[in-house]
Image (tube, helix red, strand yellow):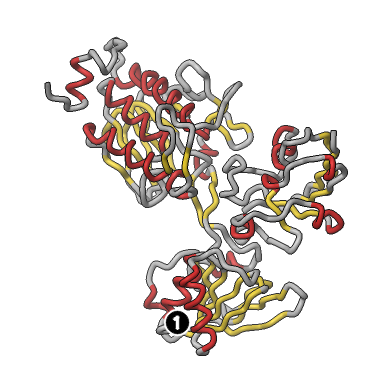
Amino acid sequence: MIKTDVLIIGAGPTGLFCAHQLGIIGLTCEIADNLDKAGGQCIELYPDKPIYDIPAIPECTGEELTNNLLKQIKPFNINFHLNQRVEELKKVGNRWHIKTNENKEFDVASIVIAGGVGSFEPRKFPVKECEKFEGNSLFYSVKDKTIFKDKTISIFGGGDSALDWAIELSNTSKVNLIHRRDGFSGAESSVQKVKELNDQGKINLYTKYQMEAVSGENNIETVKIKHDEGEIKEIKSDYVLGFFGLIMQLGPILDWGLNIDKKKVEVNTENFETNINGIFAIGDICSYPGKLKLILSGFHEGALAARGCFKYAKPDEKLRFEFTTTSKTAQERLGIKK
Amino acid sequence: MPKITYNTHDNNTHTIDVQNGLTVMEGAIQNDIPGIDADCGGGMSCATCHVYVNDEWLDKLPEKEDGEEDMLDMAFEPKKNSRLSCQLIVSDILDGLVVNIPSKQG
């Protein structure tokens, strides 16, 4: 069990800056995130899109913002627990015990939920029977590509993941690529490659088709696809892969007894604490009168929530307000040598 | 003010006055119409404000920008009349627009 003052759930800009604020006031923290890297929506949704409303930064991309925040918290040597979805929460005395889906356990004085609009999960097929095959012959990501050798794979989607896997798997498997329109959102070079492979008969490309049904005994045997104009084709398939990007889901947080309204966690505006003492929520996931869904608001919320955490981590101490420009303690924590 | 009609998946009809310049998505969010999530807040980067537009309105709508069709690839059950409601800016021309909200957004 990892013991620290605060667990921050979510490694987006708000969570990262909150870690900075905790570090400045002398509290320790660890950060967990469901994604495989820090940055949250900034990295997952718009790494290259410029942002124009970060105070004192006229223009930066989501990726630059993330990298700068990571640089800013470097002095605190914070541990990241990536690919971890926080699942269980238990109050033990005046501490919280938290467990992730990978069975990592934390023992903390307080929790800051900086979960954006929830954790990113793959978008799934609308066809109901798909659930039955999920994890055995239907997947939304590839963990072990060797299982596809010499099999027939039907890949759905038009983005880079769908195209890249279609190209890659066409070396060792029979690949059907099915997409809802003629245009693709993936890289143009991959689109050309797929079209070449289709001409050479190494990939069967079906455009303007979508999944209609899947069937099979224990594993998938056939997939039915339906054309825009209504025609239905039945194709033999051992495996189905769907690449429709990610969607954000609140997930297990919903079961923690927090006051939730319209997928947002209600907080006070004094320190962004939720209805449960010791659990704070900041950034896009929190709601209060006047809430603005801006990164800059998340920074403010994180600064106040960090101070709210202090009394739980150090109940016998009093927090002194200090500026980083003048505070020797803060500068020492930042590792500044004069 | 233009009137926009939102048919929700539970067969309810909500007709709302939406101010010119707002998007069809914003009209839904401000009036608590269920079924439009708009997770990204109108940035055309999540496909959770997906709607089906009644056929007679399709050619009156602003053309799809690059990227909207790409995002619609990700939407739940996209069809030919699918649009992202964050990209539909309300104006007098759209007075009377009818959109249908899908059974889910993802």
Residue at 30%, 36% in the rendered image = A30
Residue A5 image point, x, y percent: 30, 28
Viewer-nearest residue: B23 or A85: B23
Point out the residue furthest to the front here.
A58
Q: Is residue B77 left or right of residue A61?
A: right
Q: Is residue B29 above or below residue A161?
A: above
Classify A234 as above or below B11.
below
Say which chain tag 1 marks.
A
Q: Dividing the picture into quarters, in which one does residue A78 lie?
A: top left
Spot occupied by residue A8 in the image (x, y as percentages of width and height): 37, 34
Q: Pick the quarter of the image with the C terminus of chain A.
A: top left
Residue A91 at what x, y percent from top left? Answer: 40, 30
Residue pictured at 29% horizontal, 10% vertical: A320
Residue B15 location in percent, x, y?
85, 39
Residue A86 seen from this side:
no
Q: Is the residue marked by circle 1 packed among few (<14), some (14-19), or many (20+) residues within 10 Å?
A: many
- Compared to B60, does A144 lie above or below? below
Q: Is residue B94 left or right of residue A108?
A: right
Q: Most extreme residue toward the bottom, as rendered?
A: A200
Query: Of the residues shown, which amino acid type is indicated by label 1?
Result: Ser
Tell me the element at label 1. loop
* Front residue of A250 and A338: A338
Badge 1 is on which residue?
A170
